[in-house]
Image (tube, coloured by chain):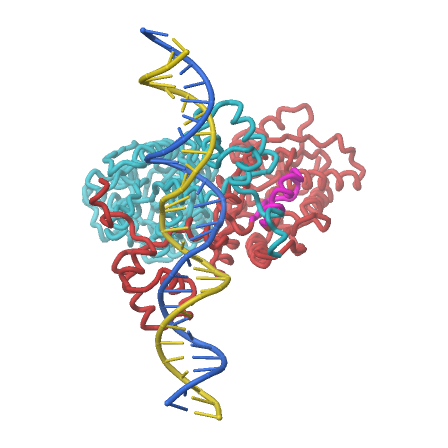
Chain colours: A red, B cyan, C blue, D yellow
DNA sequence: ACAAGGAATGTAAGCGCTTACATTATCTCT
DNA sequence: AGAGATAATGTAAGCGCTTACATTCCTTGT
């Protein structure tokens, strides 16, 4: 297999197409990338050759030569549930409209894994990166900056951040919900949250609850906190733990809808009536919030808009130095039946 | 910016590392790819240079030179719901164990988009591809074969397929469920399914229902069929349509759990008692099946095992010609409360 | 009819890496 | 101690593409 394989069976290259069409490789390249810089007759000849040979350009070679991939990477904490799905979908759609491809990786909420993914995406030549949340090792941003890869942090809003953020105020959003909860007479509050370590969304939300409590004169220590990984089952397990404590909460505020739905399911399993015996709240307002029974009181996040704005911001930054876009989106309380007045 | 920029500011390359460490580029490359082929002293020198310079290899250049990316692509119909999440997670984990990266794309259940994604993934240099379902334009498989990219079709089992399949018998699984349904006295059956056009999983499942009906002496025409896209809301809309028909079904068999959960929610909204007034079944047994109220009777699919086996099959095939693995996994009936005896 | 200018195409130098092959250093055995 | 084998490293030829620059071809104006 050395002499006979002049041309046979190998997947066709740009050069093959050029030879077949009787033009130079430069012309073929131009046909594919800026068709208007080539006269129609030639173009047809080339396109015919492309078809005939079943030619497919080698992306890696192209990226190497052009130093641009038209690809943007996104690293989300998880694909296992729908929290990021809608936002990412919108993100992708907006990129698509600009001829840019999306590369997704998921970090399983692990900092080190995320850093690895960042390196991977960068070395794959991503023209830009979407990250969830802002707080992370400054070295990460340094690295990205050195590599000249623009970043947008989404799902958070931070006017002081070094990179553009597109998101909402997690602290305020949760605080508003907590105020509502407290105004309904609840005093024994518990929360089920994702690990707050290295997760600014989670920790900001937690802060929101505490702030509302403080303002209402409820000691911060009264808040029972359970940290757990995201997941329906995990929400159930956490709730069970909460309900075996000395002082049982009258309301459980969950860090997201997935945990909340799990908590409700478990509560019912334990013979509790939601919301008569126990109120439950969520965060995000994803689809399951509506179909949960009882339907979930939660914070509505404009996922689609966030995804779209993030894409725009990123697209603007490609090839640019820096960029200071900060976009603050509004969240709204979505009151449904899982939260009720508390009466002792 | 022409004379001064000998070295400044550019992101470091292999050659920079080599120069810095005082060795050849080949040695640096070997340090990174097969460390044992290089003596420790040299290796340390090189690794130090790598660290010092903050060197990150250029993936595209590597792929171009090595003709191998250690990357496997997967194209799933949707990321919007959890149907594929668990399987894909397991797939990814197994790949990870082999130092292979996963690239995911989603086709939104559109054939043409899927074909585009296949081309993209191939031209990105994927060493192999995971596809959902087997039935598609033969040209696709021809293309893949010509490019020398191995494929595995998952979520289906087809002993006659030209490519390895790792999955279960959609027909039989649904037929068993339908038999159970019929044995409970149901005669007026309806189904909410994904578009069967170009979707072998959906059409096989539909065939399963019809086969069970025929065997039980129920005319096939009695089956009300609604095709819709996957989604909770869509399931609800479909159910509403079903319940305004002349003859109302006593059971709605849904093509998957997402549709089923949506149907249940809508049924309750319409004042129907599930399962007393209407039974509902799903398919997949994903998390929401359990927490639905009432909990969903469905077909349990061993998603994790499927993902893992698919990864193994694919890994085995990389660099090989063909491969004939066929793996049939068992599904089981997961009986819960959304399905009840029918009494007129 | 011819020069000037622009449009279309060609030439060839990389992009940053891997790897076959050549070279040099090191070890083993008699 | 020296030959021969083996290990470590170096040299340099690509991988398949893009693009600056050179060349050729066609307009257009006078």
Residue B50 locus on image (x, y percent): 56, 34
Residue A90 in the image: above or below residue B329: below
Residue numbers of the magenta segment: A129-149
Which quarter of the image is occupied by the N terminus of chain B? Answer: bottom right
Residue B92 locus on image (x, y percent): 42, 36
* B157 or B295: nearer the viewer: B157
Residue A214 falls in image quadrant: top right
Q: Residue at x 32, y 49 (%)?
A: B191
Q: Residue at x 30, y 35 (%)?
A: B317
- Magenta span includes A133: yes
Residue B304 locus on image (x, y percent): 39, 32
Q: Is residue A276 left or right of residue B89?
A: right
- Magenta span includes A40: no
Residue B312 in the image: above or below residue B263: above
Q: Is residue B10 left or right of residue B117?
A: right
* B6 or B296: nearer the viewer: B6
* B48 or B127: nearer the viewer: B48
Residue B62 seen anywhere in this rendered image of the structure: yes
Residue A236 falls in image quadrant: top right
Q: Residue at x 49, y 33 (%)?
A: B28
Residue D2 locus on image (x, y percent): 37, 15
Residue B172 seen anywhere in this rendered image of the structure: no
């Amino acid at each position: 297999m050395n002499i006979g394989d002049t041309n046979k069976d190998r997947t066709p290259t740009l050069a093959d197409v050029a030879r077949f069409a009787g033009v130079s490789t430069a012309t073929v390249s131009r046909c594919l990338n800026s068709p208007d810089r080539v006269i129609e007759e030639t173009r047809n000849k080339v396109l015919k050759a492309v078809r005939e040979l079943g030619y497919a350009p080698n992306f890696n070679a192209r990226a190497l030569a052009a130093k641009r991939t038209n690809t943007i990477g996104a690293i989300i904490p998880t694909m296992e549930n729908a929290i990021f799905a809608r936002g990412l979908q919108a993100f992708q759609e907006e990129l698509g409209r600009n001829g840019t491809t999306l590369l997704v990786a998921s970090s399983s909420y692990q900092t080190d894994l995320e850093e690895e993914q960042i390196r991977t995406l960068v070395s794959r030549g991503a023209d830009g990166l979407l990250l969830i949340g802002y707080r992370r090792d400054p070295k990460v941003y340094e690295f990205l900056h050195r590599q000249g890869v623009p970043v947008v942090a989404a799902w958070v809003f931070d006017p002081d951040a070094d990179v553009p953020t597109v998101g909402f105020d997690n602290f305020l959003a949760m605080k508003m919900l907590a105020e509502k909860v407290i105004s309904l007479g609840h005093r024994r509050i518990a929360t089920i949250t994702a690990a707050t370590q290295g997760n600014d969304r989670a920790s900001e939300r937690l802060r929101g609850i505490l702030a509302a409590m403080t303002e209402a004169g409820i000691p911060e220590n009264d808040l029972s906190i359970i940290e757990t990984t995201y997941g329906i089952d995990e929400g159930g397990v956490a709730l069970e733990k909460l309900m075996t404590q000395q002082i049982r909460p009258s309301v459980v505020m969950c860090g997201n809808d997935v945990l909340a739905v799990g908590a409700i399911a478990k509560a019912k399993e334990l013979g509790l009536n939601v919301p008569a015996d126990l109120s439950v709240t969520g965060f995000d307002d994803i689809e399951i919030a509506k179909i949960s029974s009882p339907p979930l009181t939660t914070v509505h996040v404009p996922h689609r808009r966030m995804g779209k704005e993030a894409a725009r911001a990123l697209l603007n930054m490609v090839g640019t130095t820096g960029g200071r876009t900060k976009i603050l989106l509004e969240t709204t309380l979505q009151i449904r039946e899982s939260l009720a007045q508390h009466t002792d």
